[in-house]
Amino acid sequence: MKLFLFIVFFLVVSVSGCLEETRYDGGKNENEEKPGNQDGGNSVRDLSLSSDGRFLIRGTLIDENDPDSEKVVKVLDFETGRTARLDFEGREPLKILFGRSGFAYFIVKESEIYFLQEFDLLSCKKNREWMVNDSYKFAIDRTETLIALWGENDITTIDTINDKVYNRFIEGTVFDLKWLPLSNEIAVVQSNDTGGSKIKLMTLQLEDIKEIEVPNCASSLEISSDGGTGMISPTYCKFDPVSVIDLKKRSFVKNLPGFGPVAFAPDGKYAVAFARKTDLENAAGIKTETLFSMLFIDLEDYSYEVLELGSKIPVYTITPDSELILLYSESEESDYKGIVVINYEKKEIRSAFGKQVAMNEFVMTPDSRNVFLIDENVLYKMDTKNLVISELKLKCGLIYGAPSYCSANEIMITPDGSEIILGMVNGIDFAIFDPVYLGIKRIISME
């Protein structure tokens, strides 16, 4: 594998329109499990942990063999040890967001009507509900009191403190919606009439503030940790670039040759995206040998470094300390076998040692020292310093009659990284695992 590195300054590439759709198997890894809320809300079928680590929520089907059977959602309070089942009064729960301490919000559906329900997790009782338009995703602001919900053409915002609801039908498909952390405005991403996209900035009351034209296909708006920079970078629109938006000045800055999905490093120093060989040569005059490369974009001046990858697009994840980028691919034709690690400062590419495992269910410790992952119901640990992957044998004692039941298929980590929560294969129990001593401390049932 060849390392080919360029540094490019102040390049502006203006490309608009989606010329052709191309599918890739790789991109940003969305399978990392961590406390708090995910983009668009957490699925009730997944394991969710509140950002303070107190409440664990898990949804299951009464009959796992029947996808249309009733969903059961249970809450485990780690502080009291209490388990309770939430009552949705016959409606189907779809997604969850954690609100201010002790509150959670669920999108539920009855026939074709959608509702937002507020639950007090201390009592596990429903407080309020609001009927909303067709809403498939939702987001909460930094105060955890303002909620925005959206479908294809509808946006609803709710002020949960003052119990105010605002609705707006919007022409054109809503591709993404984000709360802007600096201003607490809403940014709505849509396509425009010229083949590019636009970002509509709105108030809580859904009144227009400003519209930012972006010469790129509409896609997810990613925002830096300080809230000052936004990027749009499609994955499925061939030849479309990485678009940089100054969220402080509310203006489009420039396009960089590449494609998404794009992700910001947690420390706010750089962003990561992909680039094609043809785009780099045609737009920037950079010649590379491999079909695909990775872009490392400096957030101070938007210069970028190009690191050659190979003929397939891997899946990537940035560690919490921003020092490493973890890559892996399940494609048999990929240049990568198992997990591969890039050191950001040195741009060194190294392969992990041990069994080739998939990063489809994993957590990272806050210090970035270890990755714990589940592959085919087996728990593994990867030390990010020596890149050794080791299998961890679980010991459940006399809890289970057969050793085969002492295995997990879900994983979560507490905010401070002191404990790992393993969802056991029976769908009921959780093992509290010590990431230092590498053993189960206790098993909690959610029956």
Image (cartoon, rainbow, N blue to C red):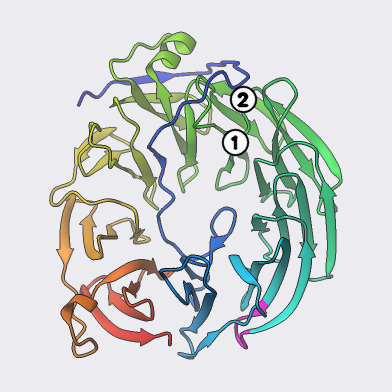
Residue 121 lies within the magenta run? yes
Q: Is residue 57 left or right of residue 431?
A: right
Name the residue carrying label 1: 219
The residue lying at 48 percent from left, 18 percent from top is 9
Farthest left residue in view: 354
Q: Which residues are magenta?
A: 119-124
Q: Quadrant of residue 196?
A: top right
Give the image location of residue 200, x and y in percent: 76, 38
The residue lying at 37 percent from left, 24 percent from top is 306
The Cα–Cα distance between marks 2 and 1, rounded to whole angstroms, is: 9 Å
Name the residue carrying label 2: 216
Element on which disc 1 rests: loop
Above or below: residue 354 compared with residue 37: above
Which quarter of the rendering shows the N terminus?
A: top left
Please state which amino acid type lies under the numbered disc 2. Asn
Q: Is residue 41 left or right of residue 172?
A: left
